[in-house]
Image (cartoon, rainbow, N blue to C red):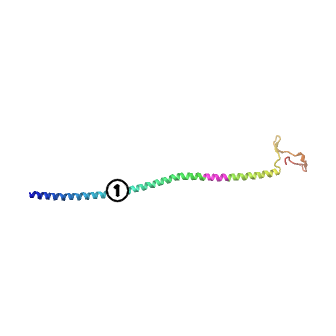
Amino acid sequence: MSDISRMAAAFEEKSKQQAENTEQAVKHAFEKHESALLSALSESEQKTSAAIAAQHQRLRQTALKSWMAIVIPVSLTFLLGASAIVTMGWYIDHQVNEILNNRTTLETLHEKGGSVDLSHCGEDRRLCVKIDESAGRYQGGYQVMEGY
C-alpha cells in the first residue's frame, strides 16, 4: 500500500503543480487580456474625447453662424432706420427753412404790392392788373395799381 500512497502523493503533488501552473498561465493570460482591454479602452476614450471636441467645435461654429444670421440683419435694419430718421430730420429741417424763407418773401411782396390783383384778360389771355382810378395818373402814363 505504500506504493499506492506514494503514487497518490506523487499524483497529488503533480496535480498541485499542474494546478499552480494552470493558475499562473490563467493569471498571466488575464493580466495580458486586462492590459489589452485597458489599452483599447484608453484609445477608445481618446477617440471619443476627440470626437466630442470636434462636435463641440462644429456646434460652436453653427451657433456663431446662427447668431450672425440674426445680428447682421437686425443691425442693418437699425442702421437703415437710423439713417432714414436722420435723412427725414434733415429734409424736414430743410423744408421748415424753405417755408420760413417763403414767408419772408411773401411779407416783402405784400409790403411792395403783394395784394395786387393780377389776371388774364381778353382772347389772347394777356396779363392784366386792376388800376386804382382814384389815385390819379402820374407823368409818363403811370397809374397806381389797386391793392398797393
Q: Which residue is drawn at 41% across and 55% down?
A: 52
Spot occupied by residue 44 in the image (x, y as percentages of width and height): 36, 56
> Which amino acid, mark 1?
Leu
Q: How many neighbours does mark 1 have within 10 angstroms: few (below 14), some (14-19), or many (20 or more)?
A: few
Give the quadrant of residue 56. bottom left
The percent position of residue 89, horizontal first and vertical second, equals 67, 53
Q: How many marks?
A: 1
Residue 20, image quadrant: bottom left
Describe residue 36's horizontal placement relative to residue 94 as left or right: left
Task: Give the structural element (helix, strand or loop) at label 1.
Answer: helix
Between 119 and 26, the one nearer to me in the picture? 26
Q: Where is residue 37 in the image (x, y as percent from the top left)?
A: 31, 56
The quadrant in which the N terminus is found is bottom left
Q: Is 47 on the left or on the right of 141, as rendered?
A: left
Instruction: Tell which residue pokes out farthest to the top in this image.
Output: 123
- Residue lying farthest left? 1
- Mark 1 sits on what residue? 41
The spot of residue 96 in percent (x, y) is 72, 52
Residue depicted at 32% across the width and 58% down the height: 38
Residue 41 is a magenta residue: no
In magenta segment, residue 88: yes
**In the picture shown, does residue 127 fall above or below 93?**
above
Principal SS element in the magenta part? helix
Question: Which residues make up the magenta segment?
Answer: 80-89
Q: Say which residue appears at 64% left-offset and 52% top-offset.
A: 85
Work out whether 11 lies above or below 118.
Answer: below
Position of 131 with respect to 88 (left or right) is: right
